[in-house]
Amino acid sequence: MQEFEGGNDHAPDDLYLERHGPAVAWLGPGCRPCEYVPDRFRGEYLRLSPHDRNLYSDIVLAESGVQALSLRDADRLGFETSEYCACLRVEMLTSHPIQDEGELADEVWQAGRFAEHLPDRLRMEAIGWASGNRQLSARTTVDRFSQKWLVRSVSGRIDVSDSYLRDVGIESLSLADAVTLGFSTREYRAAFYVRLHEERPLQCEGDLKNSMEYLSTGSALRL
């Protein structure tokens, strides 16, 4: 299989989402950064300005939806993968964001029926793509759907993934694992959209590219 040297040679990274700075924390009492707030959809969150390195608050998620967050942003703000996907599901089906934690809890529960069509979310931490000799590869393959990746178990054991992404889907990855394997937020959302509406995983890079192009022109959700 042909390989590219270094980096992610597929979709652009998430600088378009983090152009105003990455999300770093919630705005807590006394206008100080904090890890938790009572309601993540009504509370303000902080971004680190790329211009002056100061913190500033961004629009609440009840108004913007999780579409305003990159995968890294959502992970930093403490969203579980199941919560992020529940938010995506609502936004993709209704074009309206979740309004509060109570609604999120209901949607996570409701999404259980949808989750039955998904493979069990991988429970081991991804650490990178696997090379032919089962070592960590420093290269990005042409087709990530036909490449296995290395995982680390809770005990620290390193092994090769059991499946290919063409079988289980990008959306089977946790937010952190998707970032580790170099997938952009646009790619993750496109994969989730196809699973939601077509009940199938994306099969190859061409399938992913076509889905992203369709969604960029034909979907109410801004990827």
Image (tube, helix red, strand yellow):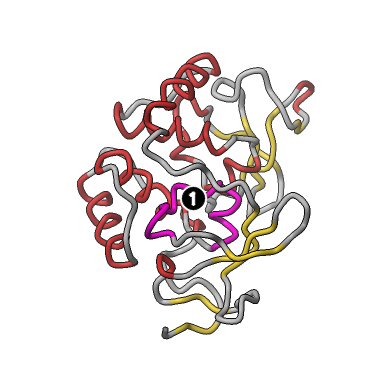
Q: Position of residue 131 (x, y in %)?
A: 57, 78
Q: Position of residue 38 (x, y in %)?
A: 66, 18
Q: In this view, does 83 lie to the left or right of 221?
A: right
Label 1: few (<14), some (14–19) or many (≥20) C-alpha neighbours in 10 Å? some
208 relative to 106, above or below: below
Magenta-drawn segment: 165-181
Q: Where is residue 200 in the image (x, y as percent from the top left)?
A: 30, 48
Residue that appears at 65% across and 35% down: 78
Q: Position of residue 181 (x, y in %)?
A: 55, 62
Please state the total of marks drawn on the protein image: 1
Residue that appears at 75% across and 26% down: 31
Q: Is residue 206 left or right of residue 34?
A: left
Predominant secondary structure, magenta span: helix
Residue that appears at 43% across and 39% down: 67
Residue 172 highlighted magenta (yes or no): yes
- Secondary structure type for disc 1: loop
Give the quarter of the figure containing the N terminus: bottom left
Residue indicated by mark 1: 17
77 relative to 211, above or below: above
31 relative to 73, above or below: above
Residue that appears at 40% across and 33% down: 116
